[in-house]
Amino acid sequence: MTEAHVAVDPHASAVGMWRRYVFSTDHKMIGRQYMLLSLLMAVLGGATAYVMRWQLAWPQSSVPFTGWLPESLAYQGVIDPAFYNQLVTMHGTIMIFFVAMPMLLGGLGNCLVPLMIGAPDMAFPRLNMLSFWTFFAASMLLLSSFLVPAGAASAGWTMYAPLSARPIYTGVYWGINLWLIAVALEFVAFLLGGINLVVTTINLRASGLTFMRLPLMVWMELTSAVLFLLSVGPLIAGVLLLLLDRLAGTSFFVPNDGDPLLWQHLFWFFGHPEVYVLLLPGVGAVLEILPVFARKPVFGYRAIVWSTAATGVLSFMVWAHHMFISGIDPRLATPFSITTILISVPLAIVLFAMIATLWRGSIRFATPMLWALGFIATFLVGGLTGIFVGAAALDVYFHGTYFVVAHFHYALFPSVFFGGFAAIYFWYPKMFGRMLSERLGQLHFALTFVAFNAVFLPMFVLGLGGHMRRIYDPTVYEFLRPLMPLHVAATVATIVLLFSQLPFVINVIGSRRFGRPAGPNPWRAATLEWTTPSPPPHGNFASAPTVYRGPYEYSVPGAGEDVLPQNQPPRLRAATPSAV
Amino acid sequence: MRDWFPHNISAVGGAIDGLFGLIAAITLAWFVVTLGVLVWFMFRYRRRDTEAAQYVRGDTRAELAWLLLPAALVLALDVVIDTSSDGIWRRMKLEMPPADLQLAVTGKQFAWTISYPGTDGVLGTADDFSLDAELHVPAGRNVRVVLRSSDVLHSFFLPNARLKQDAVPGRAIDLWFNVTEPGRYDLACAELCGFGHTTMKGSLIVHTPDEFAAWMASHAGSAAAAAASQAAPPAKIG
């Protein structure tokens, strides 16, 4: 704690490599560690998608570049059905728990929240380090599950019992045990990280930074952390019970003593708020970027804050929409259908506010802005298609089909990748002191935007055709054979989407050396993180900042400049007309 | 878009496809308008030297109306969707018609077992018989099914009938359907149930009522004969 309160640590350079890059307590380094680990895990998540997509487009053919896999997983390159189930499971697990969470909460939350509220560090820097290393351990356990005999978990990322509860049903032994331990540890890591984030936001705000002056990114991270804290407890308990079912022969989720549906309730009571845990930070990044590049305040700040809170509350009352056809009492469907569709109202307000922010603006299409606008367009599809599956009667048909797969990729990919990349392109100059290449950024955006839509739009059509998700070979079914060209299209687009990330990799690595120096405030933004050098020193601010106004004071009439930073003291007298 | 669905053969299926049409019309209109406004703003308010951004905070009542009025419209449309969905859901799940034919279906890794009541129409008697993967039903009759699982979760899915229901071990779940067109259709498992999930496939064979009665009689006769000759209890049903 004490070192965090030293404004600028004169001994920073004296700290050894080990303390500086590995066991660091500096929120910016921990944030970057989360980011790096999440991007590395995303490579693996993408690789699993590639192998699955290949098998779906060209079933029973040899998948290129998988020759190194052992014969038990892929005989002469042809993927084994049991291995396919492992890929399905690990793709979802990796992308949700080991990419989205560390990128949006661990990475963005850590890097940005203290800087945006004018704090020298998180409230508990050592706890922060512990959170990261717990998460790191969880990641390594998850990865190791690929290497144990019988392979990784294969019961779907939702780990539905009893398939997951008895090894005999999947043939997977330590794979699922390790999955459960890794996920429980991951939850513990983000529980600790979430507490830290909440305490930091409440207690370490700069003087004058009232709640209604907080940048919306901070509001979103805070809401996200609170939702996670309130929802994850039951699932941690559930994970431990499932582990007991596997290791000690208990029957919490196995009939006749236990109930498989109990697992689904525990999973989705967490799982649905989790969707908003992952959505809100992306929304926050977009809401920071829009005003900067439109040069005007966010439209309806308070309406956004209240809508976010309403979304958070509602997100606890919708979980059974994942269970309409699971065998729950059918009378439950209508109330859960109503709450589910009702959640469209606050989300619509946020989306309308984003668009209204552009109204009468002066828009500059820099790379972060492209990603932010891409977020709006794609998330719109994700939100609207949720209504189809939220309507219980229609969900009977769409449940468990590619329609759902397309829907949730349109809901989560925008937040994690459009929001995440928007944030990286926007704050990279702050974190590393160098600008990213605009040209590579535009290329990255254009390719990703087109390829993403080309992957997932066909999946809506597959869903209309009734195509079940998680099946290994669609050609087995008569009614799916006419849909095969759509699989081929989605697979080709997946390969393009994966290669579309190369400009990004080149950009973030190359710009560290060759990028134009950024200076403290390259985008002429108003929030506190832009008032300190790039990258900020240990302790962030040379002296504790004082805040005089809201975070989005752009193009204020009579202000002279088109931006009024939050920490700029108000002038006693209004500017003379000649100064305008 | 409706052409992309598998051919509908069920009495309720038309209503479900209609609900899809309603939601598609509403959401597509929203999508076009919202995206249209976004793209128009992007074009109209692109940076120009002649025009500066205007300081609009969107916090006066008049400005907030631009958020709240569309949101109110969203709410109104939500109510329309909820109401029509609820009506169809009731028809499918809550108001089950009396059964013309009662079957029992059990999912197991990796097959569907269908138990037929024989000519007496009652499950649990000597002329019962079971078939794997073949679901024979008469056209235009209300068929009720008791759905069970003997191991893990499965999901009983008849795409052409727009019907899906999870089979849960430890529970017996009632469902019904009424299919109108004779023919052979796919029966699938729609819940990941293990490495053989994809192959957990069956057929729905819809007969004309006369044809079905004859089919049932021939199978029930041989089942009863087999049972009698062995003096063993009839094929057990779940």
Image: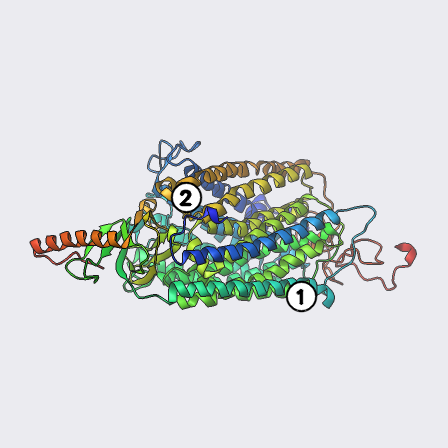
Mark in front: 2 vs 1: 2
Point out the residue furthest to the right here: A578
A393 over B132 or under it: above or below: below
Taking the image as shown, residue A335 lies to the left or right of residue B65, namely left
Quadrant housing the C terminus of chain A: bottom right
Q: Which of B165 and A35 is in front in this view?
A: B165
How much space separates mark 2 and mark 1, taking CA atoms? 44 Å
* Residue at the (42%, 62%) spot, across then down: A266
Q: Label 2: which residue?
A: A87
Q: Which chain carries label 1?
A: A
Secondary element type, mark 2: helix
Secondary element type, mark 1: helix
Q: Is residue A524 visible?
A: yes
Q: Which of B192 and A26 is in front in this view?
A: B192
The disc at residue A495 is none
Q: Which of B37 and A153 is in front in this view?
A: B37
Q: Is residue A199 visible?
A: no
Q: Are marks 2 and 1 on the same chain?
A: yes
Q: Label 1: which residue?
A: A211
* Residue at the (27%, 52%) spot, across then down: B136
Residue A441 pos. (x, y %)? 65, 40
Residue A276 pos. (x, y %)? 54, 58
Taking the image as shown, residue A347 lies to the left or right of residue A209, namely left
